[in-house]
Image (cartoon, rainbow, N blue to C red):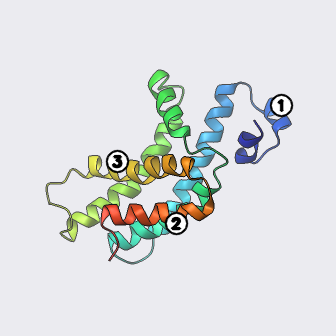
């Protein structure tokens, strides 16, 4: 509970006074984390450069967030489970996730435009896969390698595997 409170920016005692239910706490905590990621990712890709440059900048920008996630890297699977069980209740999370996906879909569109991806690449599917690789996979690996010293090797490995480094 302490980690949840810290991530939400409140004290553990305030959790019980502020939130009406565990679901409300879960929803607000997850929405807060996704908003922070979305803001960071949008800022990272706003500058000039190729899609690879923007992707690499994005990876480097989210590294501190992943390294300071207070043990939350594995929450993605919980979120997916909750979305499947009660989609209406957690629609706000899906909406924020869709905002995240737009960043990756735009990168895929740029990759198609410059000829790095085939013209018939499905932007939505490829963007969602790029997001999954970037967030889910790196979060999972960072769970098992939680040291901030491990974060850059994780990010560098993603860049190598996706071919975004020279």
Residue contact between numbered discs 3 and 1, judged by CB atoms under 8 Å: no
Give the number of the disc on residue 4: none
Q: Earlier in the sequence, mark 3 or mark 1?
A: 1
Q: Quadrant of residue 26?
A: top right
Q: Quadrant of the N terminus?
A: top right
Q: Residue at x 21, y 64 (%)?
A: 112
Give the number of the disc on residue 128: 3
Nearest to the observer: residue 87 or residue 55:
55
Give the number of the disc on residue 152: 2
- SS class, disc 2: helix
Q: Residue at x 49, y 25 (%)?
A: 88
Q: Could you say where residue 46 lies in the image, as x and y percent from the top left?
A: 45, 70
- SS class, disc 3: helix
Q: Quadrant of residue 37?
A: bottom right
Q: Could you say where residue 91 lies in the image, as x and y percent from the top left?
A: 49, 32
Residue 99 in view: no
Give the number of the disc on residue 17: 1
Q: Earlier in the sequence, mark 2 or mark 3?
A: 3
Nearest to the observer: residue 165 or residue 45:
165
Q: Which residue is farthest right? A: 13
Nearer to us: label 1 or label 2: 2
The Cα atoms of the two marked residues, 1 and 2, are separated by 39 Å
The Cα atoms of the two marked residues, 3 and 1, are separated by 37 Å
Position of residue 60 in the picture relative to residue 164 (left or right): right
Q: Quadrant of residue 30?
A: top right
Position of residue 2 in the picture relative to residue 132 (left or right): right
The Cα atoms of the two marked residues, 2 and 3, are separated by 23 Å
- SS class, disc 1: helix
Residue 163 in view: yes
């Amino acid at each position: 509970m302490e980690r949840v409170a810290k991530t939400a920016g409140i004290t553990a005692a305030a959790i019980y006074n502020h939130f009406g239910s565990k679901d409300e706490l879960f929803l607000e905590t997850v929405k807060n984390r996704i908003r922070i990621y979305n803001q960071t990712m949008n800022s990272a890709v706003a500058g000039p450069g190729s899609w690879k440059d923007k992707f690499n900048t994005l990876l480097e920008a989210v590294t501190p967030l992943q390294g300071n996630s207070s043990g939350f890297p594995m929450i993605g699977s919980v979120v997916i489970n909750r979305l499947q069980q009660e989609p209406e209740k957690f629609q706000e999370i899906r909406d924020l996730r869709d905002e995240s996906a737009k960043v990756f879909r735009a990168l895929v569109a740029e990759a198609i435009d410059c000829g790095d991806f085939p013209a018939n690449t499905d932007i939505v599917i490829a963007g969602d896969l790029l997001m999954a690789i970037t967030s889910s996979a790196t979060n999972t690996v960072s769970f098992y390698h939680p040291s901030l010293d491990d974060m850059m090797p994780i990010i560098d490995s993603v860049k190598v595997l996706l071919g975004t480094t020279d």
